[in-house]
Image (cartoon, rainbow, N blue to C red):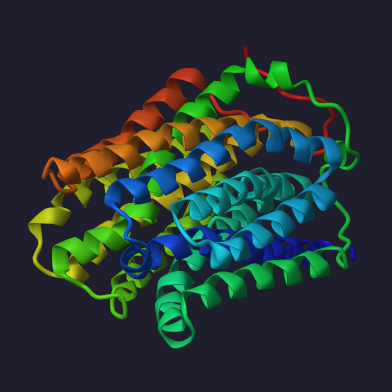
Amino acid sequence: MNGNGARWVIVAMVFFAITLNYVDRQILALLKPTLEAEFHWSDQDYANMGTAFQVATAFAFLGTGWFIDRVGLRLGFALGVAVWSLAGMAHAFASGVTGFIASRVVLGVAESVGTPAAVKSAATYFDHRDRQIALGIGNTAPNFGAILTPALIPPLAVAFGWQAAFLLAGGLGLVWVAVWFLIRVQPVALDAVDPAPVPWLTVLKSRNTLAIAVAKVLSDQVWFFMLLWLPDLFHRMFGMKQGSLGWPLVLVYAMAAAGALTGGWLPSRLMAAGWSVNRARKTVMLGYALLVLPVVLVQSVGSPWLAALILGLGLFAHQGFSTNIFGVTTDVVRARAVGSTIGIAAFCGNLCSIGMIQFQAYALKMGWGYAPALAVCAGSYLLALLMIHLLIPRIVAVEPGARGVAIAH
């Protein structure tokens, strides 16, 4: 397929793949009450499953970003989706904590392909003007997956058993792989067309990479905390049962999806109005960082829907901020090295998120509830923006068709 319109087919495919990615990983959180009762898990067992996933994903990011750059987007993305779909289906056959942990490990390794592949798709198939919109649409996919999961998975599990949820999501991923190989679209970034060696150590030592990595650490810890613990928060605070637990979460993640769309649209509009890339990015990111602050109020409200609105505003801001982290990456890094850069940054973000996952289990054990973790969430984005500004004082976009790797030391 050729032409500008055909490139949006890639956006649709990326959107669907990352949606399935987040459905696969979120099913466990939504079925926690059911599986906890059947397998007699403790909160620590559940935290350990989350930790196993995070550790596997984090260390895999060190290789999968490079892998996508090295073997190419087309093959690398397909392999990732195929393996994570099979790993998701394997949950249906687990018979205890060990089996679930093993499935989570393989799922985490394979799903690490998703983020660098999605960002590299935008850098490969879109110029600087359209890339921001493509990133914004792509970054709504985690939220769309998080909306679908609480809306569909609990009723599906009640009607057909919890195993059916894992099998259906995994099967859809295998269908995606077949369709992906049927699609061919002409890329824009010529330096990303042919697989080639990437100077991984040079990318690792870049000041740009450090800035993106620090921002991912501070924002990812919030995202993974929310994904893993929000269902439990609503269950504990408001006594919500399995069948009704998902609906406030639908509102939370619907608001998050809107945030991702604005995260792509706002900087593009500001740039079109004559703002510099640097001014547009940092102004938009500051606005999102301020919108996260009210999450500290969640435990003081008495309604699950009011709590969902506050948390939804926080994730609206998170996804807008996150979209612009990816945007900064494609601004300052050549398309050939985007996968490696995002892979390194995502490794840092996933690994450091383990601290929040384990801290929350400890906080519940000590009777602290969710207040300390929510306070950390509130301040993370202002600190992330400060670090980006210190490490990249002026964001200047590289040309999409140029060859080589833009490195700031």
Above/below status of 129 relative to 64 = below
Q: Is residue 306 left or right of residue 326?
A: left
Instruction: Give the x, y percent position of residue 337.
Output: 74, 31
Residue sitting nearer the eye, 308 or 398: 308
Residue closest to the far bottom:
159
Instruction: Give the x, y percent position of residue 158.
Output: 40, 83
Q: Is residue 31 left or right of residue 17?
A: left
Residue sitting nearer the eye, 144 or 394: 144
Q: Is residue 357 left or right of residue 407?
A: left
Above/below status of 159 relative to 157 = below
Q: Is residue 119 left or right of residue 236?
A: right
Residue drawn where x is 76% and y is 25% of the image? 405
Residue closest to the far top:
409
Residue drawn where x is 79% and y is 47% of the image? 76
Above/below status of 105 relative to 90 = above
Q: Quadrant of the C terminus?
A: top right
Residue 342 at least partly seen: no
Q: Quadrant of the N terminus?
A: bottom right
Residue drawn where x is 64% and y is 30% of the image? 62
Residue sitting nearer the eye, 322 or 369: 369
Instruction: Give the x, y percent position of residue 200.
Output: 73, 22
Residue 187 at least partly seen: yes
Instruction: Give the x, y percent position of residue 291.
Output: 28, 49
